[in-house]
Amino acid sequence: MTSQNIYILGIESSCDDTAASVMHNGRILSNVVANQKIHEAYGGVVPELASRAHQQNIVPVVDQALKKANITKDQLHAIAFTRGPGLMGSLLVGTSFAKSLAYGLNIPLIDVNHMQGHILAHFIDEDGFDKPPFPFLAMTISGGHTQIVKVDYYFDMTVIGETIDDAVGEAFDKSGKILGLGYPAGPEIDKRAKLGNPKAFTFTKPRVDGLNFSFSGFKTAVLYFIQREVKANPNFIEDRLNDICASIQYTIIGILIDKLKQAVKDTGITHIAIGGGVSANSGIRQALKDGEQKFGWSTYVPKFEFTTDNAAMIAIVGHLKYLEQDFAEQDVLASARLKI
Ligand code: KG4
Ligand code: ZN
């Protein structure tokens, strides 16, 4: 076996997506994700249901990932899995499955930090996508995370800012719920924001020290604003939905960009890599592009399928750790609050 011929299976089960991916020498051969539709009816992820759905999905998802990659499990060199952070019941399914598969095949087991996965997804070999040079700032924004991380090298990372309450995706989703939009509401708010006036309404930005974020007060501000306006005009939401969405999105983007500007100022680093489901937002992408002109940033956004929760990002971390022979023992435990 040469270092030029490595097959890694990545498994991700930290929240509500069951995912498996096969990587060959840093390139993705397959990337399978089973989304759990069941949570839509509840307007958010229900941990018990997520865990049960992972149990049902994991075998067919892994099977499909191997089939799509056109390899058999005997060709694998290692099994990489998400150890944390995430929902304990969800993590346990992926962890125990990965352990038994690695044990049965007698190949190394590699534990992966989900947040490092979001960041190192930028290093998947993919035509047309540049890899950020070290050092860079990674901003991971999704329904579960909001972090700014200083990345000096693959496994030399420091969290320099994070949310003290809700994640930015929750700010989108909870605002959307107040407006009667479906879950998750982020994509719909994005779509409507394009048709509305971002300055129609103003929401005060939370004041949080340093590079940390807070979004729980923002959601309450949206709720009180809507309640007040609906009292005066019962059709307010229907009449002004696009303007409301545009104003909500504008405020959220402002919060993110202000902190990024501060992070660039504090660190002197101008390479910015974003990841997580919210990085699909067209307004955020535009604001980052504008930052290239205005502030001399260079920005990196991975291919979309590698930015929401997926197993390709787990496989790339597995690949990088495999090169360093950094393996886990069979007694490794899932960790809901695993830190970078
Ligand atoms: O990474 P992801 O698929 O799952 C995790 O939360 O880990 O992110 C989902 C989040 C949801 O909150 C969703 O509303 C948000 O990403 N999202 C968006 C957009 N697309 C997805 N938020 C704003 N604009 C979008 N275009
Ligand atoms: Zn995630």
Image: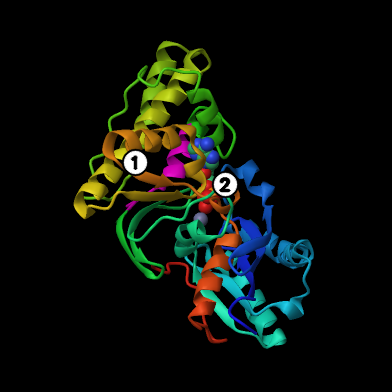
Please give the range of residues in magenta.
Answer: 162-175
Q: Residue at x 55, y 72 (%)?
A: 319
**Element under label 1?**
helix
150 to 165, vertically: above or below: below
Residue located at (32% from left, 27% from top): 203
Q: CA distance from mark 2 to mark 1?
A: 20 Å
Residue under the point 48% across and 24% down:
193
Q: Which residue is mark 2?
A: 304
Number of marks: 2
On whether residue 165 falls in the magenta region, the answer is yes
Q: Quadrant of the C terminus?
A: bottom left
- Could you tell me which secondary element the residue under label 2 belongs to? helix
Write down the quadrant of residue 191 in the picture: top right
User: Where is mark 1, residue-wise?
Assistant: 256
Q: Position of residue 85 (x, y in %)?
A: 47, 65
Q: Amino acid at mark 1?
A: Leu
